[in-house]
Amino acid sequence: MSNQVISGVDWTQVNERLKHHWGLLTDHDLEQAEGNIRKLVGIVQEKTGRDKDEVERFVYTTVDEATSTMQQMASKLADSFQGAGDAVRQRPLGSVSTAFGAGIIAGMAIGCVLVRSR
């Protein structure tokens, strides 16, 4: 895993946590890793002068936590979509009516904004 680019990770969260833990790191330093754990560990180690094992432990822990957060968010989103799908199946006409009404209201709001901006 250390030679791979890791996907499905909230890199913003990882980078913020690393910068908070080791104040010497900049956004530019962290962008150079391009999602590669080995590069990230090397950059952090070079910049901070910390032991490789310490840096690896912290980086892997941080990446694991960020991955877990993303998985939880994806699960909640999937649950929401499932709930919306269930509502549409139970009340198809009501769902279409609601969507139509929301579209009319959104169109009127956009029209008002466009008219005012002229």
Image (tube, helix red, strand yellow):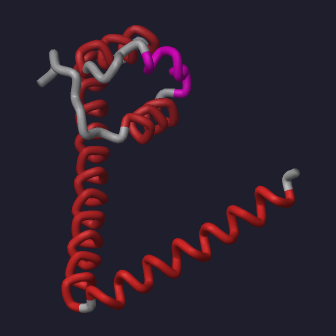
Report x, y in % for residue 113: 77, 61
Q: Quadrant of residue 86?
A: bottom left
Magenta-highlighted residues: 23-31
**Quadrant where the image shows the N terminus:** top left
**Is-magenta flag for residue 25?**
yes
Q: Total number of numbered labels? A: 0
> Where does the image place residue 26, in percent across and percent down from the top left?
54, 20
Task: Answer with the quarter of the image where residue 56 lies.
Answer: top left
**Residue 6 covered by magenta stretch:** no
Nearer to me, 94 or 44: 94
Which quadrant of the structure image shows residue 11?
A: top left
- Residue 60 higher or lower than 100, as above or below: above
Q: Tell me if 97 is positioned left or right of 51 in this view.
A: right
Front position in the image: 5 or 111: 111
Measuring 77% from the left and 56% from the top, which residue is drawn there? 114
* Residue 88 placement (x, y as % from top left): 26, 82
Residue furthest to the top in view is 46
Q: Is residue 9 above or below residue 54?
A: below
User: Is 85 in front, or is 20?
Assistant: 85
Taking the spot 31% from the left edge, 11% from the top edge, the residue there is 42
Looking at the image, which residue is at 44% across and 32% down?
15
Q: Is residue 27 left or right of residue 96?
A: right
